[in-house]
Amino acid sequence: MRVTMVLIINITFILVVFYISRSVGWNFSKVNLPNDVFISRFAIWKNRVFLAAPRWSKWSNNSVTLLEAPWIEPEVLSLMNIPSPPATAYLSPELQSLGKDCTNLLSVTALDIDNRGRLWVLDSPEDMECPAKIIIYDLHHNEEISRENLLGVPRKNLKCLTVDPVIGLWGHRGYIGDPGDESIIIFDTGLTGQRKWWKLHLKHGPTFPRVYTNDLAISRKNKRLYITGTNSLDLFSIDLDKLRHKDRLSVEYSDILWHGIKLGTSTGLLCDSKDGLQYFLVSEHASVRWDTKYNLKAENHLILLQSEHVLSITDYRMDSSKNVWAIINPLWPCYFRK
């Protein structure tokens, strides 16, 4: 089915759901954000959506960096005949103020929500002398429940966080990219309340291309973590079935599988409910889906959406009905900075 997009006045971006012609947006006037603010990632939980607005470049002085907005289905919004719902700061603008306080949220670059209703936030300020950190919030009670500084980790390319839907022996686990040196960060909550993180280095032979980990996606069916970079044509994956039974004491390296070359440089990555891998082709303004049962060739891709009006898709999510949503930004800002 042909996808249509509706651009609402004063909305900085829209979300497009594939397979169904509908879109939705929000009003950012309450948080004094400009119309061209860049939203890197988003996550949906019940009737709420959370948005990451990194403080990069021209947006470095934005009033907030982590937003919450109502999640209202487009057809409901239309029937109610109400204006676009407003976005607000989560939890408060005071906790996101800029300055020398490294405990504040300074530049949220990625987020995800686990199956217990906890919001994981990656805060990675580039131009400040503060370490990157992971903060976890309980959305049931709207309170912070844990935080961990990623001391010594380069912050420039930390732009991705995905939580494993499978709870392991050490609690919930998140995967973070890209810390550089062909690795990802693994973060465990720990069943005893202790939290720990470490780098998992990705092993490969001398003929393999360099591994970038800017975008990550978990396949529930084939139990793999797909890996690619915004400035890379290569697509990789690692076996999660083995990794889920390991901790930092038993594994610091993992073999990586090279699947081949994508159709072009891309942003956003998602494994849908049918185990198709979706990503956005930058040069073609196209969102495509690769059938992972076959090799990574053009004939095994399906074009879901292609339009010059779709300037940039930076993230994909599935809602509770397994519809796939994508976030569209008006610009391609420093998201591709090397």
Image (spheres, helix red, strand yellow):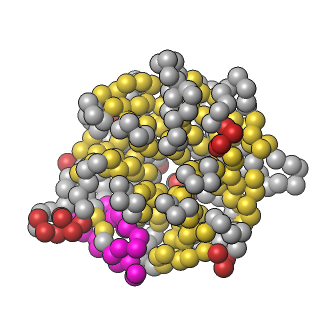
Q: Is residue 14 magenta?
A: yes
Give 159 or 96, whichever is nearer the viewer: 159
Main secondary structure of the magenta stretch: loop
Task: Give residue 87's position: percent from left, percent from top.
Answer: 24, 49
Q: Is residue 47 visible?
A: yes
* Magenta-drawn segment: 1-21
Task: Give residue 6's position: percent from left, percent from top.
Answer: 29, 73
On the rendered structure, is 308 left or right of 209? Answer: left
Q: Is residue 274 magenta?
A: no
Residue with the most extreme left position? 81
Work out which quarter of the rendered image holds the N terminus and state it: bottom left
Give 106 or 261, whichever is nearer the viewer: 261
Give 172 or 268, whichever is nearer the viewer: 172
On the rendered structure, is 52 left or right of 200? Answer: left
Task: Give residue 131's position: percent from left, percent from top.
Answer: 53, 28
Kindly identify the residue that appears in the image at 39 percent across and 63 percent down.
323
As drawn, 235 above or below 247: below
As drawn, 110 above or below 4: above
Q: Is residue 215 visible?
A: no
State the image quarter where residue 311 is shown: bottom left
